[in-house]
Image: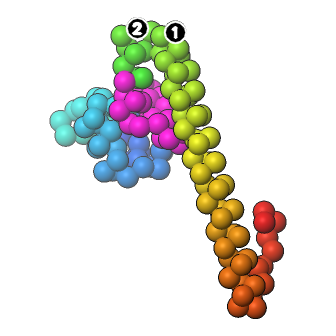
């Protein structure tokens, strides 16, 4: 085995993912490790892809969108891939902004209801730094 490859177990540990997650990413063709018998080995390409997958998940992208985005690199190259990423990022920024607005509204309403009911019961609200 080459020094620049990770075993299945090492890959799980390196990226703090479960074996089930890693197998699923392979199943949906996000990753294609080298196979030697039943053993799987992950080289630099797969580790780079895993970093991109996890970053995409952190930003809320769907796995299928990530998979399609990774395929663009293989088919059309870096320029096309990054152009698509800009489009995806713009859409996700809009989505997250809308989600934040809904959360802010819900939080505000909940705090107000808590204050109103607390006052009725004689239980003043506990002040927090973000109230």
Image spot of residue 94 (x, y percent): 58, 34
Side of 32 relative to 72 (left or right): left
Q: Nearer the viewer, residue 78 or 46?
A: 78
Secondary structure of residue under mark 1: helix
Horizontal side of residue 38 vs 100, given as left or right: left
Residue 103 in the image, given as x and y percentages of width and height: 61, 55
Which residue is at the front of the view, 58 or 47? 58
Image height check: is 33 above or below 98? Answer: above
Q: x, y (%) of residue 82?
A: 53, 16
Give me the residue at 48% from left, 45% from top.
Answer: 14
Tell me if residue 22 can be seen: yes
Asked if the stretch drawn in magenta spans residue 73, the answer is: no
Residue lying at 52% horizontally and 21% vertically, measured from the top left: 87
Report if residue 54 is visible in the image: no
- Locate residue 114: give its quadrant: bottom right
Classify the position of the C terminus by image quarter: bottom right
Q: Looking at the image, which residue is at 56% across and 21% down?
A: 86
User: Main structural element of the magenta stretch: helix, strand or loop?
Assistant: helix
The circle on residue 79 is 1
Considering only vertical position in the picture, is 45 above or below 8?
Answer: above
Position in image of residue 1 (x %, y %): 34, 31
- In contact (CB < 8 Å): disc 1 and disc 2: yes
Residue at which label 2 appears: 76
Side (left or right) of 82 relative to 3: right
């Amino acid at each position: 085995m080459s020094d620049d490859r990770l075993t299945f177990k090492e890959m799980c540990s390196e990226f703090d993912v479960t074996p089930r997650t890693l197998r699923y990413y392979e199943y949906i063709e996000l990753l294609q490790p080298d196979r030697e018998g039943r053993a799987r080995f992950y080289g630099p390409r797969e580790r780079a892809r895993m970093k991109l997958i996890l970053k995409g998940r952190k930003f809320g992208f769907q796995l299928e969108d990530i998979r399609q985005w990774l395929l663009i690199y293989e088919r059309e190259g870096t320029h096309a891939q990054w152009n698509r990423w800009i489009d995806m990022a713009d859409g996700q920024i809009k989505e997250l902004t809308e989600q934040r607005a809904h959360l802010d509204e819900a939080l505000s309403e909940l705090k107000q209801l808590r204050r109103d009911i607390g006052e009725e019961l004689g239980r003043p609200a506990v002040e927090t730094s973000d109230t």
